[in-house]
Amino acid sequence: MKKWKPTQDQQLGVISRVNEFFTDELHELQEELDCPDEFIYDFLEEIKNRWSPESCHTKMRQRQKENPNLY
């Protein structure tokens, strides 16, 4: 199976906007909590794990995509 890659328009558009949004939100969170970078890093790791190919969240999203009328 071929690995998905975004188009240049997607990279320059929505992906860039979401990246900037996440970064701004994480800076705000860090300022509010006065937490170290390590906390933000670990926090992102938890979020990343939700999109692991083996996570139950990923499997559920795939099932919903394959069977939209069941959910």
Image (cartoon, rainbow, N blue to C red):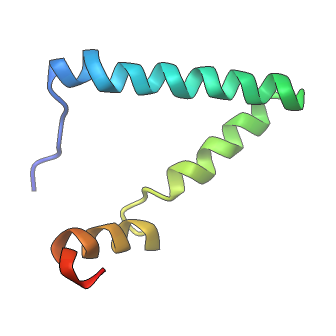
The total of numbered circles placed on residues is: 0
Which residue corresponds to the image point at 73% horizontal and 23% vertical from the top-left?
28
**Is residue 54 rendered to the left or right of residue 70?**
right
Q: Is residue 35 visible?
A: no
Q: Residue furthest right?
A: 34
Compared with residue 71, is residue 38 higher up or lower down, i.e. above or below? above
On the image, the x and y values in percent for residue 39 come to: 78, 38
Q: Residue at x 10, y 49 (%)?
A: 2
- Seen in the image, is 31 located left or right of residue 17? right
Left or right position of 15 against 52: left
Residue under the point 17% across and 43% down: 4
From the top left corner, tell me how far across and down residue 12 is, in percent: 26, 15
Q: Is residue 28 visible?
A: yes
Task: Return the residue found at the far left.
Answer: 1
Q: The C terminus lies in which quarter of the figure?
A: bottom left
Q: Quadrant of residue 29?
A: top right
For residue 19, side relative to residue 5 (left or right): right
Q: Quadrant of the N terminus?
A: bottom left
Quadrant of the image occupied by residue 42:
top right
Q: Nearer the viewer, residue 16 or 70?
A: 70
